[in-house]
Image (cartoon, helix red, strand yellow):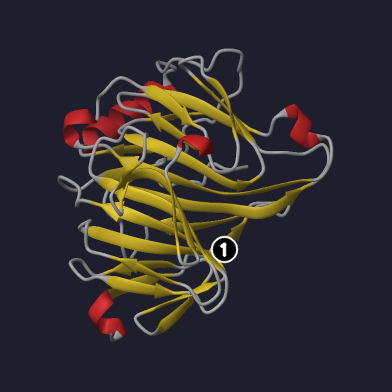
């Protein structure tokens, strides 16, 4: 099968060093593609080694109109939010925070992770909410790795993070038809990805993958053409994230930490944050101030 018949585009996100050796790659939104299914933001954080006494300190910041999904390969993050949630985030678990009409949260390294050198490696995605749920009540759900479906077949090991895939369904409650999966492929294995979902993409986390006869190294997001079954080959061991879902019910605007089908709603959220009208995170006094309107910074330290 030729590359032109299965591949829509490949996004190679730039690598940015945010200091102290902490690096991020932002695959979505991209100048070439704003969304894949409901996924509107896709950041790879790390892999990075944090020096003793240091750690992540993402101060409280707001969200509307989306759900954040934090998924770690290495390390630990302590999540706190304005609902009073305090939840350690560890590798393989799913942490789904629905912002809806508005939520505030912080993400920090826990005290025990600051004692010696620690590593951090993971993905943060934002899933845009359908219009009918953009103003839903905020909530937070944690699902340990042991609660997620696992699929094994001929050298392919898949943990289903959210949504449906290959007849399995994750216990994570979603607001639209989607899929998000962590796939480990042994050397020489093949993964057949059918056209169950309208929009699909493959993110190469480690190693490299061959799709439609083209090899893609780690750090690339490969967007697949709709309606076509695809075979993913692993000439060497590889780790991939599979993601996508149904096309969103209309365009979404994104600015700073806000996502909405309405520009006016984003403007209102910005004013609310500036005026201190969001609920605070209990026990936290710091916060990330509203940036100048021409800037939309990465909110990792």
Residue located beneath label 1 in the image: 15
- In the image, 71 versus 150, the foreground residue is 150
Q: Name which residue lies at 41% across and 83% down.
A: 214
* x then y, percent, for residue 96: 42, 33
Quarter holding the N terminus? bottom left
- Report how many numbered discs are placed on residues in the image: 1
The image shows residue 81, relative to residue 177, as above or below, that is above
Secondary structure under tag 1 reads strand
The quadrant in which residue 202 appears is bottom left
- In the image, 43 versus 147, the foreground residue is 147
Q: Name which residue lies at 51% across and 18% down.
A: 85
Residue 59 in sight:
no
The image shows residue 278, relative to residue 61, as above or below, that is above
* x then y, percent, for residue 294: 41, 47
- In the image, 252 versus 142, the foreground residue is 142
Quarter holding the C terminus? top right
The quadrant in which residue 225 appears is bottom left
Residue 52 in sight:
yes
Q: How many residues crowd around disc 1 within 10 Å: few (fewer than 14), some, or many (20 or more)?
A: some
* x then y, percent, for residue 98: 36, 29
Q: Name which residue lies at 37% across and 42% down.
A: 162
* x then y, percent, for residue 181: 41, 52
The quadrant in which residue 128 appears is top left
């Amino acid at each position: 099968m030729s590359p032109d018949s299965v591949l829509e585009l490949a996004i190679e996100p730039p690598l940015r060093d945010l200091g102290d050796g902490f690096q991020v790659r932002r695959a979505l939104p991209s100048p070439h593609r704003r969304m894949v299914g409901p996924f509107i933001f896709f950041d790879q954080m790390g892999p990075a080694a944090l020096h003793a006494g240091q750690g992540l300190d993402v101060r409280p910041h707001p969200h509307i109109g989306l759900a954040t999904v934090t998924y770690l390969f290495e390390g630990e993050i302590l999540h706190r939010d304005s609902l009073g949630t305090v939840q350690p985030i560890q590798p393989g678990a799913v942490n789904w925070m629905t912002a809806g009409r508005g939520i505030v949260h912080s993400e920090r390294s826990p005290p025990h992770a600051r004692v010696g050198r620690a590593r951090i490696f993971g993905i943060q995605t934002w899933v845009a909410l359908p219009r009918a749920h953009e103003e839903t009540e905020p909530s937070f759900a944690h699902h340990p790795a042991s609660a997620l479906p696992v699929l094994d077949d001929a050298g392919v090991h898949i943990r289903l993070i959210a949504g449906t895939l290959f007849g399995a369904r994750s216990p994570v409650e979603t607001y639209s038809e989607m899929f998000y999966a962590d796939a480990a492929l042994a050397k020489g294995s093949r993964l057949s990805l059918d056209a169950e979902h309208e929009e699909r993409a493959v993110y190469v986390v480690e190693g490299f993958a061959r799709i439609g006869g083209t090899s893609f190294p780690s750090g690339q997001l490969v967007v697949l053409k709709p309606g076509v079954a695809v075979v993913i080959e692993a000439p060497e061991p590889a780790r991939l994230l599979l993601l996508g879902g149904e096309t969103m019910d209309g365009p979404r605007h994104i600015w700073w930490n806000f996502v909405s089908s309405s520009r006016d709603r984003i403007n209102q959220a910005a004013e609310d944050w500036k005026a201190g009208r969001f609920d605070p995170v209990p026990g936290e006094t710091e916060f990330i101030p509203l940036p100048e309107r021409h800037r939309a910074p990465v909110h990792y330290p």
